[in-house]
Amino acid sequence: MNQVTDKYHKLIKDSDKHLDLLFDMKEVPKRSYQLGLAALFTGVAISFYDSFIGLYVSSFLVACFCFAILMFILLKYNGAIKNLTISIIFLICSLLIISAAIEGLQSEQFLYFFPILISVPIIVDLKQSKYRESFIYISIIVVSFGICILIGRGVTPLQDFTLSQINKLAFVNRIIAIFSTIIFAIAYIFFEKKYINELMEQSKRVIDTRTQFLATMGHELRTPLNGIIGVIGLLKQEHTASQHEEYIQVLKYCSEHMLHQVNNILDFNKIEANKLEIHPVELNLKLLLLNVATPFTALFNEKGVELKMEIDPELDELVIADDLRLVQVFNNLLSNALKFTNNGYIKLKAECKNKTKQFIEASFSVEDTGIGISENDQVKIFESFWQVYDQNTKDLNGTGLGLTICVRLLNLMNSKLTLVSKKGVGSTFSFNLKINYAKNPQQQPLVSKIETDNHLSGVRILVVEDNQINMMVVKKCLLSFKASVTCAYNGQEALDELKKDQAYQIILMDLEMPIINGYTAIFEIKKLYPEIPVIAFTASLVNEKMLSDLIESGFVDCMSKPFQPLQLLSSIQKQLLNSPFPYQQ
């Protein structure tokens, strides 16, 4: 995808904030202030009118009410009270009850309960809140109305009225009450219509966004898939070893590209659902940076771009950070730089800004001499599904999610990604991190011989997988590490095999299988053979909750399919360190 229009950027932003907008379009917080101001101005007008016709007690009472409303509005504005609406309703009802005691029912002030009742659906968001809030408001109004009628009919008015005063006051109260009721009814219709129209527009935006998302993903996944299918056809026709090697490299590139796109999509989905979490572990910061650059060496050499590394020696410290997410950020930044740089260099720079007894503050940057980014595009590139468009980059591919994911991940780490770029000169992406030291900074991480050797000689592994292609791939991979592999194609076969021979150091088990699946088999295995570590092997989307459930069920770890061989090796070696079985060279 080369370019996405500005209109689509707005749709993405709107869909990102969908729930917030649904609440904002109802404008409920604003309406509480509006109700208070309406009651304030109405009260001021009635107070002046009461004073004008000689009802000074009523005028003073309404003036006190206006002062109380003003105080509540100011307190709400300063955050001293949480619920302005219920305060205003309580004040209005209290005023009407006191007015009934002073004026009786002859002034017809009880008519004001009708516009107040009509206002409830406007000031309460029935779509977002439970009915309990509405029920409380309506109950206060109805009970107050009953008390007002009882007091007005059973109590002698505290203020004497002339017939002229009664008629004038009753007339004004009728006009204001009827007028207010009509205004609130019209406002309710207006706001509900506005809400429905906005809701329909939001639904359309979500559909448009989803359609564009699926179209983008379809294009990005079909591109490497087309390469894989095409090369397989060529492999059938070619018979020379040199051609086979070239085609295998293409297959490897296409499959890794597709896996990268899928991982980006899944990570983006987790971020949008607020389900992505940071899991800090103990790591050596300098070693992490050196390892980040290693996989890119061949790609840089192939493209003729120099990879420079400037790592401050003071970063050679044991710290607590999420290594996987940090690597993901650097991988996205380096991949992005390599994509848009055809000559010159790309520099990964890390320097220590500050050191204390508790933490180290470091600055990281990825600088390139690529095509650069114009000022107009420098904000847009951080948006989802957007990429820089350039006549020289029409052949570049990607989902446009890499930088978006970097921004969200760094936000979770309390950091911010910044950009300095000039069109045609190059770009520099940078961020700062404040990272706590490990609890025992002097203690170096233990590295056993099993971790330094890329083989599993003498390790017996039971692989439980129902898909024959997946079984073939994982078996070949483990055999290349010199492991001894036994195959089982479902949970029942695995249990039967364990009855005959329990001398397995690792079990690698799929979750979805016929006869007995992995979820059921793990309970039997942990009950009968609790000393054998079992690693879940699944193509399912594994989030934090699923991983937690798997660990609770008895699995020691989870390996996602498709897998990287070294990743699988690392997971197995990690379990062997704690295994009761001796590791034999």
Image: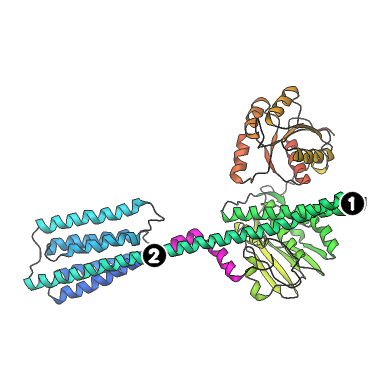
Q: How is the image coloured?
A: rainbow
Q: How many callouts does the rendering have?
A: 2
Residue 558 coordinates in the image, percent (x, y)? 68, 41
The residue stretch that appears in magenta: 1-25
Q: Is residue 525 left or right of residue 305?
A: left
Give the secondary structure at mark 1: loop
Give the secondary structure at mark 2: helix
Q: Amino acid at mark 1?
A: Glu
Q: Is residue 317 visible?
A: no
Residue 220 coordinates in the image, percent (x, y)? 70, 58
118 shown above or below 526 = below
Q: Quadrant of residue 198?
A: bottom left
Q: Which residue is mark 2?
A: 193
Q: Is residue 80 left or right of residue 560?
A: left
Residue 202 coordinates in the image, percent (x, y)? 49, 62
Residue 15 colored magenta? yes
Q: Is residue 123 left or right of residue 276?
A: left
71 shown above or below 483 = below
564 shown above or below 500 = below
Q: Which residue is mark 1?
A: 238
Q: Residues within 10 Å of mark 2 (few under 14, many from 20)?
A: few
Q: Quadrant of residue 230?
A: bottom right
- Residue drawn at the location 68% of the way across and 30% of the way down: 491
Q: Amino acid at mark 2?
A: Lys
Q: Is residue 371 left or right of residue 523?
A: right
Q: CA distance from mark 1 to mark 2?
A: 67 Å
Q: Is residue 156 visible?
A: yes
Say which quadrant the C terminus sits in. Answer: top right
Residue 32 colored magenta? no
